[in-house]
């Protein structure tokens, strides 16, 4: 039997001590509490120890590059804050995550040393420029390939990663070798394996872990060092598998539509109380690479090649080999889901546009689905909760 209380010697690189020396239930509670803490205490502790912080916007960023330079890569995923400072920098009809991501910084809830954004949509393509006008550190745009099917896409992306690494090393003041990047690839490969293990639990025995706990375990990888996240998962996953919770009569559901802006944790909790969320695209950028990145040869090339060849899908990547509606159907079949929640963040053009293709494919396949919108700052879930429960009961008692 695995020891269900974690004990660890003091380690100055540990920025999340709250989960240690606790049983599994209390450790998972600490994970949820950290996720909802808008002061980002783990990032502050990292900086107090002299570390640099590289913030990166949705969806994907090669975090291994920041890690190899000794920096902490932080997923800037928005948060439940009132946009009191950022509203004046944006138009009204934009998604929440654009505004709250900037708000987190302008309100001093988090301090970065560099920010990286991506032109994934009309709103996000201006984010780095707006950020740069309000901060005195480097704000870069990472241009991921618009045509990943091109024979030149990997070589292009390798050069783009190399360009970005130059700025990262200038910020950290470190010299990064191929061996450093390979070491980081190995750390992240372990993390990817552990994440896959977590999702295997969600698919095979979803009654052993709640939807919000699984979500929190994934999300913490964006705000603590990967070594510490690996340590947490290595300890927690065996204990989750040993649980004796009994399976309930619930519908198995896939959630699709959280590739960028994230639903509030309370919404994830509400869904988990009504059904088993057996697969999803929550924070897919943190799980974008679906297999181990090769650790021999040119490491930057390996990262670029893996982005193209060993990756998931989202509405903001246009790969003719990965038609998103077919990828969704594969996700449904692999997880043996009985229904799909097709969601989109309010004002999210890529997400709302993809809903059309998803619903056509689900109709053709005869898979029940529920279409909805969400917003990260929403606080009332009675309406959507009742709608979801009615939808699921219609399937359960059909």
Image (cartoon, rainbow, N blue to C red):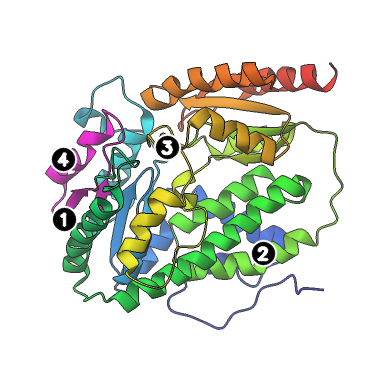
Q: Position of residue 161 (x, y in %)?
A: 25, 57
Q: What is the distance, in whole Å, between disc 3 and disc 2 at their CAs? A: 27 Å
Q: Identify which residue is drawn at 65% across, 69% down.
A: 235
Residue 260 image label: 3
**Numbered disc 1: secondary structure:** loop
The numbered mark, 3 or 2, whose residue comes first in the sequence reads 2
Identify the residue at the far bottom of this view.
Answer: 9
Q: How dense is the environment of label 3, judged by Cα within 10 Å: few (below 14), some, or many (20 and up)?
A: many
Q: Confirm or deny contact between disc 2 and disc 1 (CB under 8 A).
A: no
Q: Position of residue 119 (x, y in %)?
A: 26, 37
Residue 40 image label: none
Question: Is 385 above or below relative to 312?
Answer: above
**Numbered disc 2: secondary structure:** helix
Q: Position of residue 52 (x, y in %)?
A: 28, 66
Q: How dense is the environment of label 1, judged by Cα within 10 Å: few (below 14), some, or many (20 and up)?
A: some
The numbered mark, 1 or 3, whose residue comes first in the sequence reads 1
User: Which residues are the magenta region?
Assistant: 115-142
**Which residue is under mark 4?**
129
In the image, 138: left or right of 211? left
In the image, 51: left or right of 379? left
Q: Confirm or deny contact between disc 3 and disc 2 (CB under 8 A).
A: no
**Which residue is under mark 2?**
236
Residue 137 image label: 1
Mark yes or no: residue 62 visible. Answer: no
**Numbered disc 3: secondary structure:** loop
Q: Identify which residue is drawn at 43% across, 75% down.
A: 13
């Amino acid at each position: 039997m695995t020891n269900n209380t974690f004990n660890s010697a003091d380690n100055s690189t540990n920025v999340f001590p709250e989960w240690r020396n606790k049983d599994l239930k209390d450790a998972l509670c600490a994970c949820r509490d950290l996720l909802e803490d808008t002061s980002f205490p783990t990032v502050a502790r990292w900086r107090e120890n002299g570390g640099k912080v590289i913030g990166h916007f949705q969806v994907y960023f090669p975090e291994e590059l920041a890690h190899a330079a000794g920096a902490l890569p932080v997923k800037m995923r928005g948060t439940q804050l009132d946009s009191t400072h950022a509203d004046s920098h944006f138009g009204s009809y934009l998604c929440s995550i654009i505004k709250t991501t900037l708000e987190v910084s302008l309100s001093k809830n988090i301090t970065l040393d560099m920010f990286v954004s991506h032109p994934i949509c009309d709103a996000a393509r201006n984010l780095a420029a707006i950020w740069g006008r309000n901060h005195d550190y480097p704000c870069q745009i990472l241009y991921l390939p618009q045509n990943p099917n091109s024979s030149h896409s990997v070589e292009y992306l390798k050069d783009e990663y190399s360009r970005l690494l130059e700025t990262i090393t200038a910020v950290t003041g470190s010299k990064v070798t191929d061996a450093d990047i390979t070491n980081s690839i190995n750390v992240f490969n372990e993390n990817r394996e552990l994440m896959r293990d977590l999702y295997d639990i969600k698919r095979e025995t979803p009654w052993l872990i709640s939807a919000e706990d699984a979500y929190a375990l994934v999300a913490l990888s964006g705000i603590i060092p990967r070594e510490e996240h690996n340590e947490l998962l290595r300890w927690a996953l065996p204990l989750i598998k040993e649980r004796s919770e009994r399976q309930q009569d619930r519908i198995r559901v896939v959630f699709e539509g959280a590739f960028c802006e994230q639903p509030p944790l309370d919404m994830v909790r509400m869904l988990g109380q009504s059904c088993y969320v057996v697969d999803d695209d929550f924070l897919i950028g943190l799980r974008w690479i679906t297999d181990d990145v090769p650790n021999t040869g040119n490491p930057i090339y390996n990262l670029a090649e893996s982005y193209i060849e060993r990756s998931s899908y989202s509405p903001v990547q246009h790969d003719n080999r990965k038609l998103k509606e077919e990828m969704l159907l594969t996700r449904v079949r692999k997880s043996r889901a009985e229904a799909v929640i097709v969601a989109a963040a309010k004002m999210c053009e890529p997400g709302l546009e993809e809903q059309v293709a998803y619903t056509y494919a689900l109709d053709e396949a005869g898979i029940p689905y529920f279409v909805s919108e969400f917003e990260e700052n929403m606080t009332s879930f009675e309406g959507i909760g009742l709608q979801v429960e009615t939808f699921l009961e219609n399937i359960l008692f059909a």
